[in-house]
Image (spheres, rainbow, N blue to C red):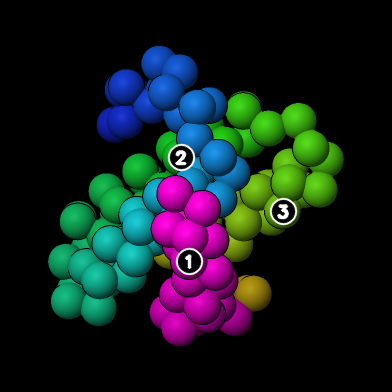
Amino acid sequence: MNPQHKDLAAGRWRELSFMEQMANIGSEVERALHWQARHHSLYSQKAHDRALELVDLTLDSTRVFARLKELARLREALVDYFCGTNQYVSSESSWKKYFSGFTYAARRNH
């Protein structure tokens, strides 16, 4: 798979704080939700793929066990929501609520 975020994959991602990384993942998830609500499945899928790419970059850049565990669960839940049966009963509002704290913290610390 070719990285969509080439400059981030080349190492710039590691320069961002964890809060900034999570806020950026949240931005892609919000894009996927936006396009899903408008029944543009191709755009939603592309945004979802970019979100997963950022989750993978974050998994590669962290060594804190608690974060690794949360990121792995996040990836699993995103795939379940967008591609699976939604067994975790996620919703658009729950995703927005989850990422809003990271966005707030990233903006506050920047």
Residue most toward the right?
65
Taken as a whole, is the magenta stretch helix, strand or loop?
A: helix
Label 1–label 2 contact, CB within 8 A: no
Task: Say which residue appears at 79% left-offset and 37% top-offset.
Answer: 64
Q: How dense is the environment of label 2, judged by Cα within 10 Å: few (below 14), some, or many (20 and up)?
A: many
Numbered disc 3: secondary structure: helix
- Give coordinates of residue 6: x percent, y percent: 31, 22
- Which residue corresponds to the image point at 34% horizontal and 65% vertical from the top-left? 30
Q: Give the structural element (helix, strand or loop) at label 2.
A: helix
Residue annotated with mark 3: 70
- Bin the neighbour count of mark 3 within 10 Å (Cα to Cα): few under 14, some 14-19, many 20 and up: few
Return the residue nearer the eye: 85 or 91: 91
Q: Which residues are magenta?
A: 89-110
Expressed as whole percent of the image width and height from the top left, the position of residue 27 reads 35, 57
Q: Is residue 71 left or right of residue 96?
A: right
**N-terminal of the two: label 1 or label 2?**
2
Residue under circle 2?
Answer: 54
Q: Amino acid at mark 2?
A: Leu
Amino acid under disc 3:
Glu
Q: CA distance from mark 3 to mark 2?
A: 14 Å
Q: Is residue 49 visible to us here?
A: yes
Q: Secondary structure at mark 1?
A: helix
**Residue 2 drawn at (x, y percent):** 32, 23
Say which residue label 1 marks.
Answer: 104
Of all residues, the one furthest to the top in this rendering is 10
Give the residue at x 64% y 74%.
Answer: 88
Instruction: Check residue 46 in the rendering and tell me which mark sits there, or answer none.
Output: none
* Residue 99 visible, this angle: no
Distance from label 1 to label 2 (Cα)? 19 Å
Nearest to N terminus: mark 3 or mark 1: 3
Give the residue displayed 31% in from the left and 30% down from the top: 5
Q: Nearer the viewer, mark 3 or mark 1?
A: 1
